[in-house]
Image (cartoon, rainbow, N blue to C red):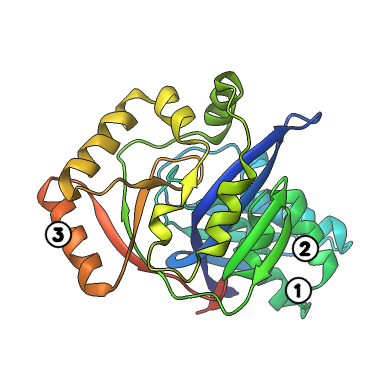
Amino acid sequence: MVTLKAYGKINLCLSVTNKRADGFHDLKSLIQTVDVFDLVSVRINNTGKINVNMDCGKVIETQKNSAYLAAKNFFEIFRKQEGADVFIKKNIPFGSGMGGSSADASGVIAALCLIFNIDHTDNMVKLAASKTGSDTVALLSGGLNKLIDRGDTVQKIYDSPQFTFVVAVSEMSADTKTVFNQFDKNNVYFDETRFEQVLDNLNSNNLEEYIYNDLTEACLASYPPQKKFLEDCFSAVQKRPTLTGSGSALFWIAKNLCQAQELCKLLTKNNIKAIVCNSVSFGFKIE
């Protein structure tokens, strides 16, 4: 059995450029893996079947489970028939926009690569990840990545700065499909300059002034309690947060650990669950 940590992510910015003919959306985003992780264990069972067990307390139909799809795509692409048992211990908040399902998928693929002695940077591996989900290729790579198209065209940004984030975790989980459906009704237009400004200011002390998420209003409209959550977070720290992914988690970039701990303390004092996390340069780590 192979067990590894599969890391979540923060979207430093997220643009939705257009809706595709296949129903998906083209994106432009910068995502950074962070040291919040799920534990993913995989073992070959030699039954030809894929079994997934998760401890998240959520009922997810097997055929729609990203971990199941990742294993299925891997076996199909590499023409293997052994089958596998997958065990996932959840730590990444469910429905938070921190990439939990994509992390689990990338973790399964990384574990299978280790089992079968396949380089996880192999193009066929990337194809398996791409077929599984939009962020899976980037989370398999880890670090800071620029995503375009459906989110499966990935360009790694090397020599990126270290980030310390404070994340406010909502009690509510957001469904990605619901948020994108609402986005389509909002008629928001892509602004290329905003994305370029984030790229240009990655090493700036003022980066937080430029980060954004095009899905924010769609998330607030889809889930009215999220608007109060955002207002409560702002009231607690007097700094406007940014949505990560399709929600529901909100985040701030801290200048240092001391400031991060202070922001976390203010949020906790106002009964808001908050965590401090740091950027990592990898997507998975063997236990």
Residue to which mark 2 is pinned: 126
Numbered disc 2: secondary structure: helix
Q: Please say whether residue 145 is visible from this viewpoint.
A: yes
Q: Please name the amino acid that badge 3 sits on.
A: Lys
Count the labels in the image.
Answer: 3
Residue in front for this viewpoint, 86 or 283: 283
Label 2 or label 3, whichever comes before in sequence order: 2
Residue in front for this viewpoint, 106 or 137: 137
Residue in front for this viewpoint, 239 or 79: 239
Residue 124 place in picture, x, y as percent: 85, 65
Q: Please name the amino acid that badge 1 sits on.
A: Thr
Is disc 3 surrounded by few (<14), some (14 to 19) or many (20+) residues within 10 Å?
some
Residue 186 place in picture, x, y as percent: 55, 21
Residue to which mark 1 is pinned: 121
Numbered disc 3: secondary structure: helix
Numbered disc 1: secondary structure: loop
Disc 1 to disc 2: CB gap under 8 Å: yes
Q: Please say whether residue 99 is visible from this viewpoint.
A: no
Residue to which mark 3 is pinned: 265
Residue 214 place in picture, x, y as percent: 53, 38
Is disc 1 surrounded by few (<14), some (14 to 19) or many (20+) residues within 10 Å?
few
Using the numbered discs, state the Cα–Cα distance from disc 2 to disc 3 in whole angstroms: 40 Å
Disc 3 to disc 1: CB gap under 8 Å: no
Q: Please name the amino acid that badge 2 sits on.
A: Lys
